[in-house]
């Protein structure tokens, strides 16, 4: 329900421990020359990581996962029956999107150019072989959903800057046929078990933050429509969570917001019958089917933590699954009823676990890296009175007595939230003697619909009010040094950084903005079409229709007021925060002779290359130390075998 947030030579890759076993932890010093002397913050980036394995629906022993074990995030194929694993993709700027056909015979992955997110779907055999275009006849586009049928039918969602959103269906032995088109954003939500029904999430009503759902047949004819927006007069959205995994079952699991938060319900696309589900949990949630269709797996997110529940459809009972306190970043039920989930906390690195008690994949134990990632310090929760209600923030502090220089690390999205999850970036700042403050401002998920939907018309300014409230509290509490406050973030967080430096110039000593919106009007005209639709929703129209709102929310409007030194990093191929609008802002600062450093790199909206990420953070830390001085070193890395005490 939320937004949503470089290469080595191709080879067979390292062995991955099969389910129920753990690979031996390699000696860090032996893994990479010089690793013993490598600072802990770099080890956290270089230590192997994996995503949640996702398996073929009808061949659960065939799975895909993403890993950075070669130094670049790529897709790996895993035969769980034998334990064999191989690297499936190998591209200079990495790959993260991989999907298996239901029978597990083919791997699909999206091929863009240097991170620009514009490309085509490719495929290769599961056990290896040449890549080939997956849907010949489709021109490059931005991806907007994909559904793969058991009979070989393929449903591809696409968007382009000129043609809006389209959905194409390709039958075995036939070319793709367009079955849907609209100027507003839309995407493929899923396909029924038997391939006779296709779910499309669309925003034809013009509100890009709240989707409606249409069910169509493979020929494009409409079967049913579910629309909670009431023609745009009510801000209620829907989200497709998946068709029932049972032959002949036309029920669709749908997320709705009718009671002020995300909840699941069943909607029978054939009869129109709606079945409310007794899932009464605060915050936000996602849900999916157990493989036999008897129950739902509910992933519940609230106040920066998450947990898992099983909802049995027969008696509407809910059972909480045993997961540690922290963040579940994805979960899937296996055919045997167990659930595998990717878990971490701010102190503990991520690992793929099972409710059966086994470690499925321990990325820190994979050979080929620097060994197990060093732990970091836990977060402290604080609640601060803000102009729109209580604001939740997560704070990590280094060893010693404050006040500390403080990095206010602002999350992107904006419909996202910071959580009690392991993150190498914040941990690095703590290692260097900084307190790190992360704020779930209005617009963040996990606190109910009203909090998420609060961003309208005064975009950016609303979030900065919440950030200011937390900033003032950390200073008054003796945590943050008022003369050494750093505003930082990437994407929407980078946008808020530049906007905050201009609208709150007295408050900040330094700004670090990654892939930001800097000139809102130019960004609107250059960005991908789906983001234009989001901007029209947030600001109430185009720059030509509501110029005063774009001006009020654009960092470029306030560039002359900026006092703090500014560091900006930008991807040359970024379709979300395009380079031209950043250069406009940079030119204005340079014209003033303002303290500024700009780092441009050959990728898109961020990088999938580990060494590139390390380089960018190293440049940011060096920039901060040049302008603020070097703080006292932070806390040494805790012993992974010794429990870490909770903060006082």
Image (cartoon, rainbow, N blue to C red):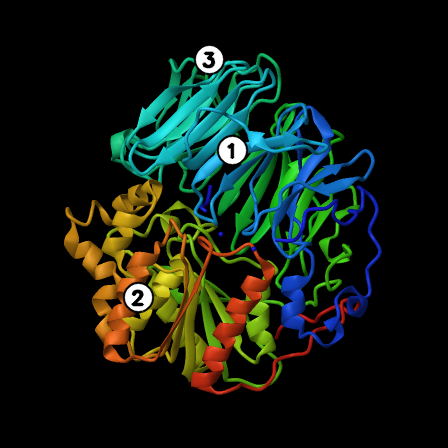
Q: Nearer the viewer, mark 3 or mark 2?
A: 2
Between 381 and 521, the residue placed more toward the observer is 521
- Residue holding disc 2: 499
Q: In percent of the image, x 56 and y 41: which residue is there?
A: 97
Q: Callout 3: 10 Å neighbours few (<14), some, many (20+)?
A: some
Q: Please provide percent x and percent y for residue 348.
A: 68, 62
The quarter in which the C terminus is drawn is bottom right
* Residue 280 appears in the rendering: no
Horizontal side, residue 205 vs residue 470: left or right: left
Q: CA distance from mark 3 to mark 2?
A: 49 Å
Q: CA distance from mark 2 to mark 1?
A: 37 Å
Give the CA separation, mark 1 to mark 3: 31 Å
| Tag 3 secondary structure | loop
Residue at image coords 15%, 56% = 548
| Mark 1 vs 3: CB contact within 8 A | no
Q: Nearer the viewer, mark 2 or mark 1?
A: 1
Q: Which residue is mark 3?
A: 270
Element assignment for label 1: strand
Please say if 608 is above or below 200.
below
Snapshot quadrant of residue 354: top right
Per the image, the residue denoted by label 1 is 121
- Position of 81 with respect to 486 (left or right) is right
- Classify residue 642 as left or right of residue 532: right
**Image x and y of residue 470, in percent:** 41, 70
Q: Is residue 539 above or below residue 264?
A: below
Can residue 506 be seen here? The reply is yes
Determine the secondary structure under disc 2: helix
543 or 110: nearer the viewer: 110
């Amino acid at each position: 329900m939320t937004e949503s947030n470089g290469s080595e030579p191709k080879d067979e890759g390292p062995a991955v421990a099969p389910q129920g076993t753990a690979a031996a932890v390699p000696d860090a010093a032996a893994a990479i020359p010089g690793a013993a002397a490598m600072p802990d913050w770099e080890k956290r980036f270089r230590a192997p990581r994996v995503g949640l394995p996702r398996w073929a629906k009808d061949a659960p022993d065939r799975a895909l996962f993403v890993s950075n074990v070669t130094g670049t995030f790529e897709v790996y194929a895993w035969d769980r029956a034998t334990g064999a694993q191989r690297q499936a993709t190998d591209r200079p700027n990495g790959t993260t999107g991989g999907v298996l056909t239901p029978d597990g015979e083919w791997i699909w992955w999206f091929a863009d150019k240097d991170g620009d997110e514009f490309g085509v779907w490719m495929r290769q055999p599961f056990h290896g072989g040449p890549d080939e275009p997956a849907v010949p006849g489709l021109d490059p586009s931005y991806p907007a959903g994909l559904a793969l049928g058991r009979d070989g039918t393929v449903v591809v969602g696409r968007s382009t800057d000129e043609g809006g959103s389209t959905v194409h269906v390709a039958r075995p032995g036939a070319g793709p046929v367009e079955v849907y088109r609209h100027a507003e954003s839309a995407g493929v939500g899923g396909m029924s078990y038997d391939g006779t029904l296709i779910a499309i999430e669309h925003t034809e009503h013009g509100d890009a933050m709240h989707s409606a759902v249409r069910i169509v047949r493979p020929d494009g004819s409409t079967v049913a429509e579910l629309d909670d927006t009431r023609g745009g007069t009510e801000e209620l959205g829907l989200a497709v969570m998946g068709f029932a995994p049972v032959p002949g079952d036309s029920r669709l699991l749908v997320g709705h917001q009718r009671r002020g938060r995300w909840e699941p319900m069943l909607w029978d696309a054939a009869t129109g019958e709606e079945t409310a589900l007794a899932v009464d949990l605060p915050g936000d949630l996602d849900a999916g089917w157990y493989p036999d269709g008897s129950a739902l797996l509910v992933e519940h997110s609230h106040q920066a933590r998450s947990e898992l529940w099983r909802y049995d459809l027969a008696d509407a009972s809910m059972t909480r699954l045993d997961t540690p306190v922290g963040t579940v970043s994805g979960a899937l039920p296996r055919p045997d009823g167990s659930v595998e989930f990717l878990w971490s906390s701010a102190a503990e690195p991520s690992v793929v676990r099972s409710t059966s008690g086994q470690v499925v994949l321990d990325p820190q134990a994979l050979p080929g890296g620097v060994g197990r990632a060093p732990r970091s310090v836990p977060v402290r929760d604080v609640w601060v009175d803000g102009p729109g209600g209580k604001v939740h923030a997560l704070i990590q502090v280094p060893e010693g007595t404050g006040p500390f220089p403080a990095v206010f690390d602002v999350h992107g999205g904006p419909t996202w939230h910071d959580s009690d999850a392991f993150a190498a970036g914040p941990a690095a700042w703590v290692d260097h003697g900084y307190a790190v403050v992360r704020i779930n401002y209005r617009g963040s998920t996990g606190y109910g619909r009203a909090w998420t939907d609060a961003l309208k018309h005064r975009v950016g300014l609303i979030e900065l009010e919440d950030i200011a409230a937390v900033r003032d509290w950390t200073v008054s509490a003796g945590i943050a040094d008022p003369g050494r406050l750093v505003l930082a973030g990437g994407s929407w967080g980078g946008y808020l950084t530049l906007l905050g430096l201009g609208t709150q110039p007295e408050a900040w000593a330094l700004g670090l903005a990654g892939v930001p919106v800097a000139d809102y009007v130019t960004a609107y005209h250059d960005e991908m079409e789906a983001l234009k639709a989001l901007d029209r929703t947030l600001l109430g129209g185009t720059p030509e229709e509501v110029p005063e709102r774009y001006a009020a929310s654009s960092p470029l409007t306030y560039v002359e007021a900026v006092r703090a030194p500014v560091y900006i990093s930008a991807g040359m191929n970024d379709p979300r925060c395009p380079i031209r609008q950043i250069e406009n802002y940079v030119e204005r600062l340079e014209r003033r002779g303002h303290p500024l450093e700009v780092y441009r790199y050959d990728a898109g909206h961020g990088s999938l290359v580990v060494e590139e990420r390390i380089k960018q953070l190293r440049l940011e830390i060096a920039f901060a130390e040049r302008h603020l001085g070097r703080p006292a070193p932070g806390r040494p890395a805790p012993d992974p075998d010794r429990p870490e005490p909770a903060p006082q």
